[in-house]
Structures are given as structure tokens and as C-alpha cells.
Image (cartoon, grey):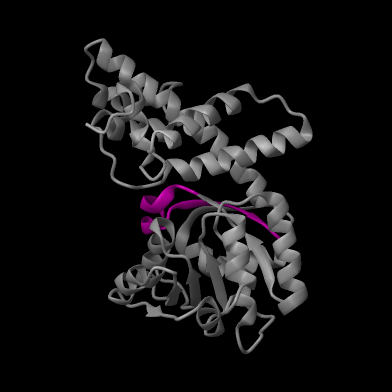
């Protein structure tokens, strides 16, 4: 499928940002990238992207600016720090900022208002589910927050990346929905890890679980994707454990503010804190299997 070419700047090209950039390049968009790691920029320029010396330089040549960063504080620096997006020249209120990071809803609403006041730019929060593999296929699930017009305008880029793109409400609604997604995923990852280990302990070939359970109530995308990965102890990076902990802590902070009892959220949050404390924060989600051998890396 072909898409009308857009000028897109991507700020932050780690695992997710680089996959987004590669997909947009494959779809024929003009992509300019910026990251604090020059090697990440170089890898994408070899694939046809243009590199930029700052977020401001990248944004200046773009109609759409995508941020894919690790925290609200990093997004804020990318937008309003020295040579940030807000410093792009010329200042063009027709530019649209699409934040595909996973950050908390309160910070999202604050940053969106601040960006509009300083530059006139609109802000769509567009956190994703599906990880780098789905980004490369253009099959992401994205839950969006922002005005109806702005969320619709973002489709010029999102249609290249998404199989499911849904407006959930005004600014921050996308990030709230992402917290729901992350809670369900975190519980699912732990459930699959325990199921794989239970199967192994019983002498069952755990790599066949997703096939044996297909179509039943226990079937899920997480089981299909991570069951074989965990059974094979395949820790190829698709998503970091410490990023999931960040999201789970945002879930807990929101729940505490609303006085919501979420016991499973508390349990999986503590499990992820244990993984990070054991030095597994930078590893793939499948490395949760290390909990069954004392977190050893052998």
C-alpha cells in the first residue's frame, strides 16, 4: 500500500523510534531524525533518513514531529530545552507534535498546553502497543488523545504505522489508555512466564503451548508472541523491563491519586522492581524467565 509522502521528524531513535523511522522510510515519507546517540542517527541515515544536529533542526524541516522517548522529563527537554522543538525556525503552528512515548497523562496535558502557548503547535498523545516488530510491519495499535481535528490530521502519518488507531478523548486520554494496556500486558507477561515454567517442570514442550491453546480462552497475543520466546530463552530486544516498570509506577501513582485498589498492579510492579534491582532493567521482557533461576544470566 502506498501513502502520500509527508515530511516527518523523529526525536529519539532507540528501539521503537528507529523502527518507526524505518517503517516511514519504507512507506516513502521524508524522514529526519535526531538522537543524543550519534551512532543511532548514522544507522538510519544509511537507510535513507536525514540526520539533524538538534531537535530544533529536525523539526524545522517537518510538518509532523514524532517524539519517542523514555520519560516525561526527557520529552520536556526535547520540546523546551536548548535547541528543542519549540526553538524550531520558522515557528509554524501548522506543525503537529505526535508524542509516541509512554508518559503520564498529567504531564501530557501540561506539555500539550505549554507547546500550544509557546508555538501554536498542536499536540497529540499517541502511545503505542505492539513494539518494534509491529512498527516495522505497520501494524501498531495506537490510542490517541487530542482534539478530533488534530487526531484526524495525525492519520497522514499514523496510517503508515498502525493497524488500529483510535481516538480515546482529549489530551491525555491516549496515555491513560496506555496505562490500561501496560497493566494488562505486565500481568500477561508474568502469567505466560509462569505458565512456561510450569509446563517445563511437568515435562511438556513449552514451545508448543501457543499452538495447543490456540482458540481457547487462554489464547492471547502475548502467549503467541512471548510463549515461544520465553521457552527458547530468546532475549532479543523488543522492549525493556525498566520501561515497563516506569509505566507500572505511573499506573500506581494514578491509582493512589484516585484511591483505587489494584492488587495485581502492585504485585507485578514489585516483580519488575526486583528484576531491575537484579540488573535486568535493560533486558527484554522475555528475560523475566530469569526469575526462575535466581536471576542468573547463564
Q: Nearer the viewer, residue 61 or 219?
A: 61
Residue 212 visible somewhere in the drawing = no
Q: Nearer the viewer, residue 141 or 237?
A: 237
Residue 175 visible somewhere in the drawing = yes
Q: Nearer the viewer, residue 23 or 69?
A: 69
Residue at the outermost top position: 202
Q: Nearer the viewer, residue 211 or 99?
A: 99
Q: Is residue 246 above or below residue 153?
A: above
Looking at the rendering, in which quadrant would you find the C terminus?
Answer: top left
| Residue at x-position 50% and y-position 69% | 11
Q: Is residue 100 above or below residue 192?
A: below
Q: Is residue 94 above or below residue 297?
A: below
Looking at the rendering, in which quadrant would you find the N terminus?
Answer: bottom left
List x then y, in percent, for residue 95.
Answer: 63, 78
Q: How many marks?
A: 0
List x then y, in percent, for residue 117.
Answer: 78, 74
Tell me which segment is drawn in magenta.
129-146
List x then y, in percent, for residue 158.
Answer: 52, 63
List x then y, in percent, for residue 68.
Answer: 51, 61
Q: Is residue 69 above or below residue 83?
A: above
Q: In screen coordinates, is 128 left or right of 262? A: left
Q: Which quadrant holds residue 38?
A: bottom left
Task: Indicate yes or no whether the magenta region holds residue 291.
Answer: no
| Residue at x-position 69% and y-position 71% | 122
| Residue at x-position 69% and y-position 81% | 93
Q: Which quadrant holds residue 28?
A: bottom left
Q: In screen coordinates, is 105 left or right of 42? A: right
| Residue at x-position 43% and y-position 40% | 241
Task: Indicate yes or no whether the magenta region holds residue 140.
Answer: yes
Q: In screen coordinates, is 196 left or right of 258? A: left
Amino acid at each position: 500500500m502506498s501513502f502520500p509522502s509527508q515530511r516527518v521528524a523523529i526525536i529519539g531513535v532507540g528501539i521503537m523510534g528507529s523502527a518507526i523511522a524505518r517503517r516511514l522510510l519504507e512507506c516513502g515519507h521524508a524522514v529526519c531524525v535526531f538522537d543524543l546517540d550519534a551512532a543511532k542517527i548514522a544507522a538510519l541515515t544509511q537507510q535513507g533518513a536525514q540526520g539533524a544536529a538538534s531537535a530544533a533542526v529536525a523539526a524545522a524541516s517537518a510538518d509532523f514531529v514524532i517524539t519517542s522517548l523514555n520519560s516525561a522529563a526527557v520529552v520536556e527537554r526535547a520540546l523546551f530545552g536548548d535547541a528543542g522543538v519549540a526553538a524550531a525556525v520558522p515557528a509554524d503552528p501548522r506543525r503537529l507534535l505526535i508524542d509516541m512515548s509512554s508518559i503520564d497523562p498529567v504531564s501530557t496535558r501540561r506539555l500539550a498546553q505549554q507547546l500550544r502557548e509557546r508555538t501554536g503547535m498542536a499536540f497529540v498523545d499517541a502511545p503505542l502497543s505492539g513494539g518494534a516488530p509491529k512498527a516495522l510491519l505497520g501494524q501498531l495499535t495506537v490510542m490517541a488523545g487530542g482534539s478530533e481535528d488534530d487526531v484526524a490530521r495525525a492519520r497522514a502519518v499514523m496510517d503508515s504505522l498502525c493497524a488500529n488507531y483510535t481516538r480515546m478523548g482529549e489530551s491525555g486520554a491516549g496515555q491513560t489508555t496506555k496505562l490500561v494496556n501496560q497493566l494488562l500486558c505486565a500481568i500477561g507477561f508474568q502469567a505466560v512466564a509462569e505458565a512456561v515454567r510450569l509446563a517445563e517442570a511437568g515435562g511438556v514442550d513449552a514451545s508448543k503451548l501457543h499452538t495447543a491453546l490456540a482458540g481457547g480462552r487462554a489464547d492471547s497475543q502475548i502467549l503467541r508472541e512471548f510463549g515461544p520466546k520465553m521457552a527458547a530463552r530468546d532475549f532479543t530486544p523488543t522492549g525493556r523491563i525498566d520501561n515497563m516498570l516506569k509505566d507500572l509506577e505511573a499506573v500506581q501513582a494514578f491509582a493512589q491519586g484516585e484511591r483505587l485498589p489494584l492488587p495485581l498492579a502492585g504485585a507485578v510492579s514489585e516483580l519488575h522492581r526486583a528484576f531491575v534491582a537484579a540488573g535486568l532493567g535493560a533486558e527484554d521482557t522475555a528475560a523475566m524467565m530469569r526469575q526462575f533461576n535466581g536471576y542468573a544470566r547463564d
